[in-house]
Image: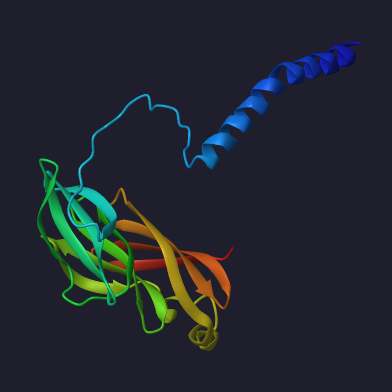
Amino acid sequence: MNAVYGRMFRFFVCILLLPSILFGHAELCQLKKAGLFRFEQAEHEYSVSSLGSPHFYDSSTFVFKGEIRVVFLEHISGKGERLMTGEITDGKLVGSHAVFAEVGTYKNPTVTVDAKGQAYLSWEEFKEDRWQVMVACFDDGRTERIEVLNQPAFFSGDLQAASVGRSFANGINHATAPHPQGGVSIVWQQDMGGQFDVAHAKVSEWIADFRTEHS
């Protein structure tokens, strides 16, 4: 009996809602034909301002020495990207400058400040025919001790070195977190002969400890 009542209830609910569904669909079709659209007003609205050129993108903010700073990419038409940094003061970008003078192919620039106040810049860069996961100490907008995290030699303990050399390819989609004992933990997806594994490196006092999880 309860099952019968349940089916009857669902039937009447569908009958009651059907006109609203059909009317809403018809209204949306009319708006689409007119080149318009319907939206619900946001509950809260916040004003935003542009930090500069429309060619700026892929930004990441961080707090360093009490200041709000940002790293981002600037698209250079026909050439690639320039990795940039600057400060945000009173809602404006000030002191922006290139981290590297050369234009390259970059992705996902990120700055992570560890528990000791040391800033680390990490990014992905296409060079030597593959995407490389890079990290460097980052002081006053300048890099020190640049390292490539996804070097084939770092993974030779898990696979045969010769195999790694032949099949080792792109490292992409890296993410970072400050380590509670200092330094940063970095994870990324590493192409190992056509299979993307999850790789991890802990960088502290410029001693890198590498781990790879096969999945």
Task: Examine the image and state in which quarter residue 90 appears.
Answer: top left
Q: Position of residue 6 (x, y in %)?
A: 82, 15
Left or right: residue 164 versus residue 13 is: left
Outermost residue, left direction?
Answer: 95
Left or right: residue 125 versus residue 206 is: right
- The one of 17 and 154 positioned closer to us in this rendering: 17
Q: Residue at x 63, y 25 (%)?
A: 23
Vertical position of residue 189 compared to residue 60: above or below: below
- The one of 74 and 15 positioned closer to us in this rendering: 15
Vertical position of residue 91 compared to residue 5: above or below: below
Left or right: residue 141 versus residue 56 is: left
Task: Examine the image and state in which quarter residue 56 appears.
Answer: bottom left
The quadrant of the picture occupied by the N terminus is top right
Answer yes or no: is residue 156 visible: no
Q: Position of residue 83 (x, y in %)?
A: 23, 66
Answer yes or no: is residue 146 visible: yes
Q: Position of residue 98 (x, y in %)?
A: 15, 67
Q: Position of residue 106 (x, y in %)?
A: 32, 69
Q: Residue at x 53, y 83 (%)?
A: 167
- The one of 116 and 72 positioned closer to us in this rendering: 72
Please give the count of numbered marks on the rendered protein: 0
